[in-house]
Amino acid sequence: MEQRLSLVTLGVMDLERAHSFYRRLGWVGHEVENTVFFQAGGLAIVLWGREHLAADLGVADAGIGGFSGVALAHNVRSTTEVDDIMAAAEEAGATVTRAASTTFYGGYAGAFRDLDGHAWEIAHNPGFALCADGTLRLPDFSRARDDT
């Protein structure tokens, strides 16, 4: 597993409220299917409903002392890489919370919690470009909407 992050997803209680907050900070994001994406240097910050994020990761959202509402993601170039990293994580002591499988967005991903309970997603998303150095580049969501 390369030593890098691709996305940090923040599970939010109210998507519009959270999106408005980041807009007031000067951030420019793109809302796509009830998810807001911000390019943040070589990675992305994502806002998504907290309950959706917990369900997608296969974890219970128990509030204080439970799921933190934050997921770290490591995007890779192939489904095989997802499987290899998930196996390595489990061998290292991680708890697999969602076995790798095809995703609703046409990718392939699995999720686990590390030894301290931090949630990770390992994903292959053919719609998100990965540069040679692992930098993630979001697609131009505004162009995709214009084509529909």
Image (cartoon, grey):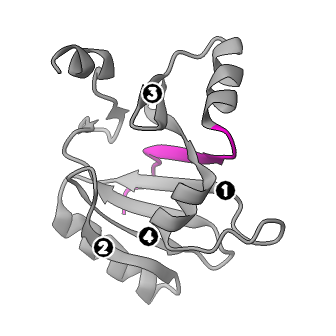
Circle 4 or circle 3, nearest the eye: 3
Helix, strand, or loop for circle 1? loop
From which residue to which does the magenta span run?
A: 1-14
Amino acid under label 3? Glu
- Res. 31 mark: 3
Which residue position holds label 4? 111
Amino acid under label 2? Ala
Q: Residue 7 lies in magenta, yes or no?
A: yes
Q: Position of residue 79 (x, y in %)?
A: 19, 64
Which residue position holds label 1? 69
Position of 100 compared to 72: left or right?
left
Decide which of tag 2 and tag 4 comes sooner along the chain.
Answer: 2
Q: Mark 4 to mark 3: distance in Å?
A: 24 Å
Q: Mark 2 to mark 4: distance in Å?
A: 7 Å
Q: Nearer the viewer, residue 72 or 91?
A: 72
Q: Position of residue 40 (x, y in %)?
A: 51, 27
Asked if disc 1 and disc 3 are in contact, CB closer than 8 Å, the reply is no
Quarter of the image where the N terminus is located: bottom left
Q: Position of residue 117 (x, y in %)?
A: 66, 74
Q: Nearer the viewer, residue 88 or 119?
A: 119
- Res. 100 mark: 2
